[in-house]
């Protein structure tokens, strides 16, 4: 399983989490609360965790193409919803499960 994570420092982490999950719920399986969300895309899964300092996003997929697509879907929507913050592209960091296995 391939995995990458990004963090957005923002006071609106919970707001963006809920907004993203409500938006995606019209087309895919989504579960969420004010602080945690999970989106099941055909290309991969995205986990979102919000706290008072920001929003952590984790994308997972079976392959490179799916991982890139999952990251793009989440990031493009987040940047659109957070347009008032003039955000830069997210810094996705790989955290593949194979790197942590012994």
Image (cartoon, helix red, strand yellow):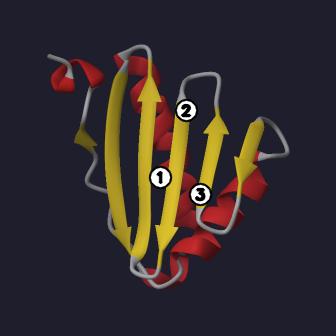
Residue depth check, mark 2 versus mark 3: number of the one nearer the observer: 3
Where is residue 21? Give x, y as percent. Answer: 70, 54
Residue that badge 2 annotates: 45
Q: Residues within 10 Å of mark 1 (few under 14, many from 20)?
A: some
Residue that badge 1 annotates: 75
- The mark nearer the N terminus, 2 or 3, is 3
- The mark nearer the N terminus, 1 or 3, is 3
Where is residue 7? Give x, y as percent. Answer: 34, 61
Whether residues under marks 2 and 3 lie with C-beta atoms below 8 angstroms apart, the answer is: no
Q: Nearer the viewer, residue 12 or 33?
A: 33
Q: Which circle marks residue 25 in the picture?
A: none
Q: Residues within 10 Å of mark 2 (few under 14, many from 20)?
A: many
Q: Residues within 10 Å of mark 3 (few under 14, many from 20)?
A: some
The secondary element bearing badge 3 is classed as: strand
Q: Is residue 53 above or below residue 98?
A: below
Q: CA distance from mark 1 to mark 3?
A: 17 Å
**Which image quarter: residue 54?**
bottom left
The secondary element bearing badge 2 is classed as: strand
Which image quarter holds the C terminus? top left
Residue at x-position 78% and y-position 57%? 22
Residue at x-position 54% and y-position 61%? 78
Whether residues under marks 1 and 3 lie with C-beta atoms below 8 angstroms apart, the answer is: no
Residue that badge 3 annotates: 36
């Amino acid at each position: 399983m391939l995995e990458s994570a990004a963090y957005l420092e923002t006071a609106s982490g919970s707001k963006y989490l809920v907004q993203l999950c409500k938006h995606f719920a019209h087309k895919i399986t989504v579960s969420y609360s004010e602080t945690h969300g999970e989106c099941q895309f055909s290309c991969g899964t995205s986990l979102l965790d919000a706290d008072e300092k920001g929003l952590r996003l984790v994308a997972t997929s079976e392959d490179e193409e799916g991982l890139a697509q999952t990251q793009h879907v989440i990031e493009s929507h987040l940047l659109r919803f957070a347009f008032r913050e003039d955000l830069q592209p997210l810094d996705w960091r790989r955290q593949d499960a194979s790197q942590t296995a012994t």
